[in-house]
């Protein structure tokens, strides 16, 4: 399988509970390498832009509120099949449906406060990485 890069975000519910290290350790244990990382308290405008694909969904307002409620850690992860692997380690969007051992099963509070984000396809991974990082910030 090819080496890929994917975009990952540790959401405010998790940074506020001081889970950045524990979540990053789970990503690393799965074979993903952190090639870029920074802490960002996103503005409403940044959150609305990042989640523009969801702008007509009923939960959009709540999503923007949740994502601007505290700092996030934005990361780029690299590894074999990184996009799918990250989604597997994250677990289902709703933690009630997440498999044992996944980040969301272990740490998420609810569907809105579900601790992590991960890109779902190569195209979105490229877009999301470029939204938060410039090329020189990615150190493989
Ligand atoms: P993500 O994009 O954050 O990695 O999560 P995902 O693919 O598993 O979920 P997605 O459908 O893309 O939804 C994005 C985020 O919106 C929040 N959400 N709330 N209240 C609701 O019904 C609802 N549905 C989705 C979640 O925080 C989800 O991660
Ligand atoms: Mg998504």
Image: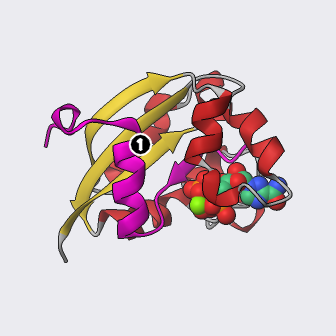
Say whether residue 124 is left or right of residue 58: left
Q: Is residue 47 left or right of residue 8?
A: right
Left or right: 115 in relation to 30:
right
Residue drawn at point x = 62 percent, y = 50 percent: 51
Residue 105 at least partly seen = no
In this view of the protein, which residue sits in the foreground, 83 or 97? 83
Most foreground residue, 108 or 82: 82
Position of the C terminus by quadrant: top left
User: Which residue is more in the foreground, 111 or 103?
Assistant: 111
The x and y percentages for residue 104 are: 62, 53
Q: Does residue 37 show up magenta in the picture?
A: no
Residue at the bottom extreme, as displayed? 1
Q: Residue at x 45, y 23 (%)?
A: 39
Q: Is residue 138 magenta?
A: yes
Q: Splitting the image into 4 quarters, where does residue 56 fall?
A: bottom right
Quadrant in which the N terminus is drawn: bottom left
Magenta span of residues: 113-140
Q: Residue at x 28, y 69 (%)?
A: 81
Residue 1 in view in this figure: yes
* Residue that mark 1 sits on: 131
Q: Above or below — where is 103 with respect to 94? A: above
Which percent across, then down, holds residue 116? 57, 46
- 66 lies left or right of 85: right
Residue projecting furthest to the right: 58
Can you name the residue that lies furthest to the left here?
140
- Ligand 2 quadrant in view: bottom right
């Amino acid at each position: 399988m090819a080496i890929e890069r994917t975009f990952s975000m540790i959401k405010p519910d998790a940074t506020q509970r001081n889970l950045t290290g524990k979540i990053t350790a789970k990503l690393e244990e799965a074979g993903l390498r952190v090639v870029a990382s920074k802490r960002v308290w996103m503005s409403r405008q940044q959150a609305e832009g990042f989640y523009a694909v969801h702008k007509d969904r009923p939960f959009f307002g709540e999503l923007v509120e949740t994502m601007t409620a505290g700092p996030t850690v934005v990361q780029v992860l690299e590894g074999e099949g990184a996009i799918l692997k990250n989604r597997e380690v994250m677990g289902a969007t709703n933690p009630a449906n997440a498999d044992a051992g996944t980040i969301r099963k272990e740490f998420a509070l609810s569907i809105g406060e579900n601790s992590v984000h991960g890109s779902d396809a190569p195209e979105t991974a490229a877009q999301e990485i470029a939204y938060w990082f410039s090329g020189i910030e990615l150190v493989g």
